[in-house]
Image: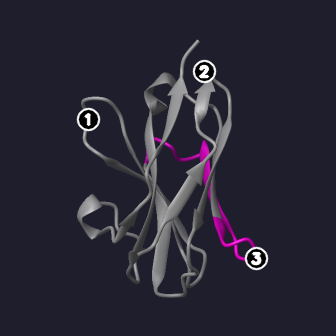
Amino acid sequence: QVQLVESGGGLVQPGGSLRLSCAPSRRFFSSYVMGWFRQAPGKEREFVTGIKYSDGSTDYADSVKGRFTITRDNAKNTVYLQMNSLKPEDTAVYFCVVHRSPVIHTTPRWIDYWGQGTQVTVSS
């Protein structure tokens, strides 16, 4: 059983920044993708970003491009999501995810492992 331990959520004002972290309980290799989904109240879970272990390539939802950045620290076996210029519509529970695939999937049905979620609230 794989555990994905998330941290870094909280309350931030519009225009502010937060950094989320995700530390898996095991190491993944080149055939895997790590990333983040989010779910706002009353809405479906949606793709935010992903990063491929094979070559470090990334993908982002249009709504976060230019504001969010996903990175990984192989030595610490941790993936980070830097969120800048946050907007109230970014308010959601953010889930760290892992799936085994040569491509970055953007729909929940392809996800193999989910974290427990961390709340991000953007409000003045």
Dot 2 crowding, Cα within 10 Å, few <14, some 14–19, many 20+: some
Q: Is residue 109 left or right of residue 55?
A: left
The range drawn in magenta is 62-78
Q: What is the CA distance from the residue labelled 3 to the residue labelled 1?
A: 36 Å
Q: Give the residue number, with chain letter if any, for mark 3.
A: 75
- At horizontal 60% and vertical 31% (from top left) the residue drawn is 10
In this rendering, position of residue 28 left or right of residue 73:
left
**Nearer the camera: disc 3 or disc 1:** 3
Q: Secondary structure at mark 1?
A: loop
Q: Outermost residue toward the front? A: 1
Q: Where is residue 40, by image quadrant?
A: top left
Residue under pointer 2: 14
Quarter of the image that includes the N terminus: bottom left
Front one among 119 and 58: 119
Screen quadrant of the C terminus:
top right
Is 57 covered by the magenta stretch? no
Identify the element where label 3 is drawn: loop
> Is residue 65 located in the magenta-colored stretch of the structure?
yes
Q: Earlier in the sequence, mark 3 or mark 2?
A: 2
Residue 19: x %, y % from top left: 67, 45
Q: CA distance from mark 1 to mark 2?
A: 21 Å
Q: Residue at horizontal 28%, vertical 69%?
A: 110
Mark 3–mark 2 Cα distance, whole angstroms, equals 33 Å
Disc 2 residue type? Pro
Q: Secondary structure at mark 2?
A: loop
Residue count near mark 1 (Cα–Cα under 10 Å), binned few <14, some 14–19, many ≥20: few
Q: Amino acid at mark 3?
A: Ala
Residue for badge 1: 43
Image depth: mark 1 or mark 2 in front: 1
